């Protein structure tokens, strides 16, 4: 008996993250963008338009991990509506935090005994503590 469903199309990536796709919107993948309401969002990429005549859409990751499309369709509309790229310092701080998280995960993976020792030190009683007299 033949398999049901026939041939399946290969899945395309969820978002296009290359510079060429994002450049039309004025931002790049992983840029931190400040919305007109003052929220900091991170660019997730561009989704291709479904069907003919549709426009590609830029998507952003909001705080809490929520993904949502952004309404403007080109760089000029983003600028007119008040979207702007965050200062380079915020990008550096974000990259430093990500580096520290990955570094700590790797340290924990290769040295699991270190975590137990640190917890034991923190959980111990303080030396020299006195009881209050009534």
Image: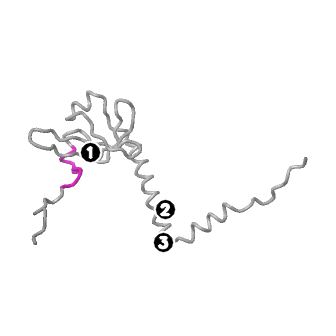
What is the number of callouts on the image? 3
- The earlier-in-sequence mark between 1 and 3 is 1
In front of the other: 58 or 79: 58
Which residue in the structure is indicated by mark 1?
Answer: 28
Rounded to the nearest whole Å, what is the CA distance between mark 2 and mark 1?
28 Å
Residue 70 in percent (x, y) is at 27, 37
What residue is at 31 percent from the left and 29 percent from the top?
A: 82
Colouring rule applied to residues: one colour
Residue 102 in percent (x, y) is at 43, 60
What residue is at 36 percent from the left and 38 percent from the top?
A: 86
What residue is at 13 percent from the left and 64 percent from the top?
A: 4
Q: Quadrant of residue 25?
A: top left
- The earlier-in-sequence mark between 2 and 1 is 1
Which residue in the structure is indicated by mark 3?
Answer: 110
Which residue in the structure is indicated by mark 2?
Answer: 104
**14 magenta-colored:** yes
The disc label shown at residue 122, or none: none
Q: Secondary structure at mark 3?
A: helix
Apparent side of residue 56 relative to residue 125 in the rendered image (left or right): left
Which region shows up in magenta? 12-22
**40 magenta-colored:** no
In front of the other: 10 or 60: 10
What residue is at 48 percent from the left and 71 percent from the top?
A: 110
């Amino acid at each position: 008996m033949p398999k049901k469903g026939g041939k399946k199309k290969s899945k395309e990536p969820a978002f296009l993250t290359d510079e060429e796709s994002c450049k039309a919107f004025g931002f790049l993948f992983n840029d931190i963008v400040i919305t007109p309401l003052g929220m900091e969002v991170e660019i997730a990429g561009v989704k291709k338009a479904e069907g003919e005549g549709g426009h590609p859409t830029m998507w952003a990751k909001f705080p809490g991990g929520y993904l949502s499309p952004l309404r403007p369709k080109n760089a000029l509309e983003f600028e007119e509506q008040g979207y702007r790229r965050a200062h380079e310092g915020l990008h550096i701080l974000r990259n430093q935090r990500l580096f520290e998280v990955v570094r700590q995960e790797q340290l924990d993976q290769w040295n699991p005994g270190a975590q137990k020792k640190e917890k034991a030190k923190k959980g111990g009683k303080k030396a020299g503590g006195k009881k209050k007299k009534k």
